[in-house]
Amino acid sequence: MFQDTQPAPLGSDGGLDRWAEFRVTHPREMQSLLRQLRDGNVPVHLSGPDGSNFTSTLWSMDGPEAPLGLSADDGHPQLQRLVDADEAVAVAYLDSVKLQFDLHGLVVVRGRGSCVLQADWPQELYRFQRRGAFRVRPGDRVSPQAHLRHPSIPDMALSLRVLDVSIGGCALLLPHDVPPLQPGVRLGAVRIELDADTRFDVMLTLHHVTAMQQSERGVRLGCEWGPLAGVAERALQRWIDQTQKRRRLLTLE
């Protein structure tokens, strides 16, 4: 329904509030969702009105009367642009749910050996269920890989870490020392290895390139699957289902 890390356009439609069913305003429900982002160390993608973007994680959320604290890399070139704009749209995912909320009053707080981006507590957030596109991140014990050749340098073989997976596509980590890729490029003959039993070949279309924290030393590539063979699609769906089941069981322990 909505693009990968891009904010959904939430403008009014002729006076009709067609986003009302997705809006969350109750403080307790908002706290619960934000707490899941914090406790799960979930990537939060910040987009500024000038096109600047930054990937962070939620560090602290003490309640509506206190500011949110997000991790920040003081040396990131786009951090100051977000602060200067004094506003950003945050997008994050909890498995099959896309969360979106506005942040205002952005301030960088620097301490000894640390840097935090603070923002006012959001007045509301939006919760979109991504039907048919369940998005999961691999567990800590597995390290899925995508094997391919650089489209501009065919002699360069790449093995990229798979950051997350959905039935519609995946996100890959492109290291900082690899020549960049541009949105719109098609990546052919990609070998996806999610685990020892889930491997398939596919074409990918790169839609988004998102800056990440300097600690990751790379950028996030948001990719869409090309046509999947029936066997590959079933294997992918089975892997997603099993990964989600394991995660739910861990939360109950």
Image: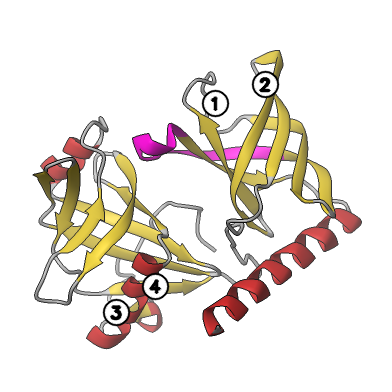
| SS for callout 4 | helix
Q: Are marks 2 and 1 in contact (CB under 8 Å)?
A: yes
* Cα distance between the residues tagged 1 and 3: 37 Å
Q: Amino acid at mark 2?
A: Pro
Q: CA distance from mark 2 to mark 4?
A: 38 Å
Using the numbered discs, state the Cα–Cα distance from disc 3 to disc 4 in whole angstroms: 10 Å
Please report whichever mark, 2 or 1, sits nearer to the chain's N-terminal start.
2
Q: Which mark is residue 151?
A: 2
Neighbourhood count class around disc 1 (C-alpha, 10 Å): few under 14, some 14–19, many 20 upward = some
Residue 103 vs residue 194, the one in the foreground? 194
For the point 14% across and 76% down, the residue is: 64
Residue of label 4 = 36
Residue count near mark 3 (Cα–Cα under 10 Å), binned few <14, some 14–19, many ≥20:
some
Query: Contact (CB < 8 A) between labels 4 and 1?
Result: no
Q: Quarter of the image holding residue 233? A: bottom right
Sequence order check, earlier mark of 4 and 1 = 4
Q: Is residue 123 above or below residue 173?
A: below
Dominant secondary structure of the residues highlighted in magenta in the image: strand
- The residue singled out by tag 1 in the image is 181
Residue at the spot of label 3:
30
Between disc 4 and disc 1, the foreground one is 4
Discs 3, 4 touching: Cβ within 8 Å: no
Secondary structure beneath disc 1?
A: loop
Magenta highlight range: 204-218
Percent position of residue 224, x then y = 64, 46
User: In terms of sequence position, does the residue under pointer 2 or pointer 4 come before the other?
Assistant: 4
Is 161 situated left or right of 21 in this image? right
Give the residue at x 69% y 41%: 145
Marks 2 and 3 sit apart, C-alpha to C-alpha, by: 43 Å
